[in-house]
Amino acid sequence: MLDPGLRGRVRILGGPGTGKTTLLVDAAAAHIGAGADPESVLLLTGSGRVGTRARSALTTALLRSRADGPLPPVVREPLVRTVHSYAFAVLRLAAQRAGDAAPRLVTTAEQDAIIRELLAGDIADGPAAAVKWPQQLRPALGTAGFAAELRDLLARCAERGSIPCNSSGWARCMVAPNGSPPANSRNSTSR
């Protein structure tokens, strides 16, 4: 694994604490130390915590190798990224190449505000609302807890690629098997 001549993609599998990150950092440092262009190295991690640890360890390893010769050239992109950061960079680059505006991540607070605005419209429209919310859910529509639960539901569905095709699908998803609204929504207060 530490062979500087190693080329191509490498995937390391192992349980927590088995040394995956250490092995990847050592391999990357050896590869760069052998003269590889640092731009050709990318370590993808599953979390920011692991990414921060790997980035720090790789920086330390590269600075230590300075005693053996010149420091590798500066890179334009991070050598260590989370999968999420890398995916966002790919989207940003695609938008740039297409001449489109750069994508922007919407914060949780912004998502909640959008959902609360949509729910307020449903409340104002009453029976004429586009979404036919079950009667037992209507009292919860104005609560911050319901908006947060709906945002979480949307996120989980999007992760699994199972977004209902119509608005009534959302209403059905928000009803517990006993016909009551989700527990967190009933006791929340409006903002």
Image: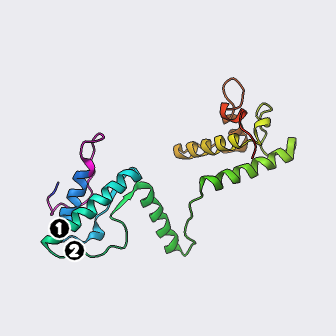
* Location of residue 162 by image quarter: top right
Does residue 53 appear left or right of residue 7 in this picture?
right
Rate crowding at label 1 as few (under 14), some (14 to 19) or many (20 or more) other CA atoms within 10 Å.
Answer: some
- Alpha carbons under labels 2 and 1: distance apart: 7 Å
- The residue located at (58%, 46%) in the rendering is 155
What label sits on residue 2 in the rendered view? none
Residue 183 point in image, percent of width and height: 67, 30
Does residue 88 appear left or right of residue 170 in this picture?
left
Does residue 138 appear left or right of residue 54 in this picture?
right
Q: Is residue 136 above or below residue 38?
A: above
Q: Disc 2 vs disc 1: Cβ atoms closer than 8 Å?
A: yes
**Callout 2 secondary element:** loop
Kind of residue at badge 2? Leu
Instruction: Name the quadrant of the N terminus.
Output: bottom left
Please check the rendered image and state whether residue 155 is part of the magenta-colored stretch, yes or no: no
Q: Is residue 157 above or below residue 56?
A: above
- The residue located at (49%, 74%) in the rendering is 97
Circle 1 sits on which residue?
Answer: 65
Kind of residue at badge 1? Ser
Residue extending farthest to the top is 178
Please check the rendered image and state whether residue 19 is part of the magenta-colored stretch, yes or no: yes
Specify the segment rendered in magenta: 3-21
Circle 2 sits on which residue?
Answer: 71
- The residue located at (56%, 47%) in the rendering is 158
- The residue located at (26%, 76%) in the rendering is 73
* Location of residue 43 by image quarter: bottom left
**Callout 1 secondary element:** helix
Residue 115 point in image, percent of width and height: 70, 50
Does residue 167 appear left or right of residue 11 in this picture?
right
